[in-house]
Image (tube, rainbow, N blue to C red):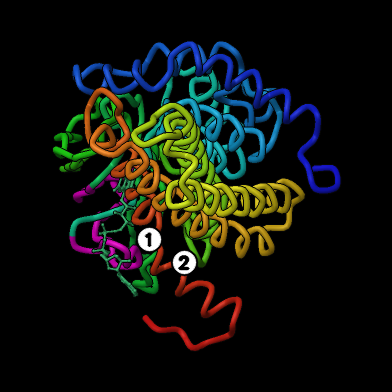
Amino acid sequence: MTGYSESEERQALRREVAKLAATYGREWFTEKARAGEKSTDLWMEVARNGYLGINIPEEYGGGGGGIGDIAAVCEELAAQGCPLLLMVVSPAICGTIIARYGTEEQKRRWLPGICDGTGTMAFAITEPDAGTNTHNISTHAHRDGHGWVLNGRKIYISGVDEAENVLVVARTEDAGTGRVRPVLFVVPTDAEGFEYRPIPMEIVSPELQFQVFLDDVRLPADALVGDPDTPDGGLVQLFAGLNPERIMAASFSTGLARCALDRAAAYAKERTVFQAPIGTHQAIAHPLAQSKIEVELARLMTQKAAALYDAGDDAGAGEAANMAKYAAAEAACDAADRAVQTHGGNGITQEYGMAGLLVATRAGRIAPVSREMILNYVAMHSLGLPKSY
Ligand SMILES: Cc1cc2nc3c(=O)[nH]c(=O)nc-3n(C[C@H](O)[C@H](O)[C@H](O)COP(=O)(O)OP(=O)(O)OC[C@H]3O[C@@H](n4cnc5c(N)ncnc54)[C@H](O)[C@@H]3O)c2cc1C
């Protein structure tokens, strides 16, 4: 970042990704989703161009860039109407955790596939009973000789059907103290005892969510990422994934918001029902202008969070990433709603595909971390208020 704008290199990256994504576009994306097909062609083209693993170190097949780069890729894809949710998960969450905490052997085994698109990795922490309270997860890992056995249930796990592996968060008890600690395992989706079932969602996307069932899944010792014998177990690994997750989720939202606003502005310039195009009426123009401001503010905070993270300031990035994720989700929900309103009845038709953006942006208020939990974070960490939960 130079001054108040991104580097020329980052801006060029944005232009290239936008050009590529425009050759696919919103119609292609929604047609794939409605036909029950996958967005694999785009995923693989993004990978072939070196964008998928742009944040992963070069020695493991990546581009050697930062979270700011992969967030720019994510935003530009969404802005062209092709949001790829698995970018948040595979290269940004899983790729970051493995690149930072995997052994040399683990990095060589998993990172190249994450970068070239052939070894996508999903991420599973959410459970039906624990929900937001991830300290309460019950997926359990116990030692079995040199290896491990995993049992539990996960819910809303994105892209399991497209993934080679899932990075699963479980808990284990210290044999001596009995203390419970989180642990992270890379579980192959074809492992015995690993099953998944799609959850019918109202989101128009080729990427689906799943229930995951782990029944006596046996794993070798080197499936574990990190050291379970440190006092906090896998907590430090888990935290390493949080800022990238939030920065990416924010970019996903601002991209969708830009997509909605571009379409709304184009429609408002064309559609005439009285003497002049509807965009002449301030009742149409002002809400869109308001959204434009809100989206740009959210983008700025997202870029700040990414710059702090890439500079190694994890604490500073934490506050900014939470604020960016909150601001982006709010801005995107409002932008999509205003864009639908601008379209009148056409806003709800499949032909115009605007209503699909309502649900897609709405999910950003809930996942990967809800707006309430971000408000809890800011109340506590930024304002010093007592913990409320
Ligand atoms: C499209 C989509 C994709 C997802 N992909 C993944 C994935 O790939 N991997 C994965 O692990 N998970 C995934 N999730 C799950 C997601 O992270 C959770 O849905 C989210 O964390 C909320 O958990 P919950 O749904 O159980 O809601 P709950 O925990 O039941 O919460 C319900 C409501 O109560 C509020 N609430 C709860 N506790 C508090 C509190 N202390 N203070 C204030 N409000 C509170 C919440 O904010 C929320 O509004 C995905 C979800 C969606 C919708």
Q: Is residue 40 left or right of residue 55?
A: left
Where's the C terminus, which quadrant?
A: bottom left
Q: Nearer the viewer, residue 5 or 237?
A: 5
Image coordinates for residue 75, horizontal then vertical, percent: 54, 35
Question: Percent position (x, y) of residue 242?
Answer: 51, 53
Closer to the camera in the image, 351 or 112: 351
Local packing at callout 1 (Cα closer than 10 Å; few below 14, some 14-19, many 20+) is: some
Q: In the displayed image of the protein, which residue is found farthest to the front?
A: 275
Residue 32 lies, with reference to residue 368, above or below; the image says above
What residue is shown at x 37% (from left), y 35% (from top)? Answer: 122
Mark 1 within 8 Å of ligand 1, using the beta carbon: yes
Q: Are marks 1 and 2 in contact (CB under 8 Å)?
A: yes
Look at the numbered disc 2 and give the secondary structure of its residue. helix
User: In the rendered image, which quarter is residue 145 located in?
Assistant: top left
In the image, the segment drawn in magenta is 129-155
Q: Is residue 187 left or right of residue 25?
A: left
* Residue 145 included in the magenta stretch of the image: yes
**Camera-nearest residue between 164 and 368:** 368
Q: Which mark is residue 327?
A: none
Q: Is residue 101 above or below residue 136?
A: above
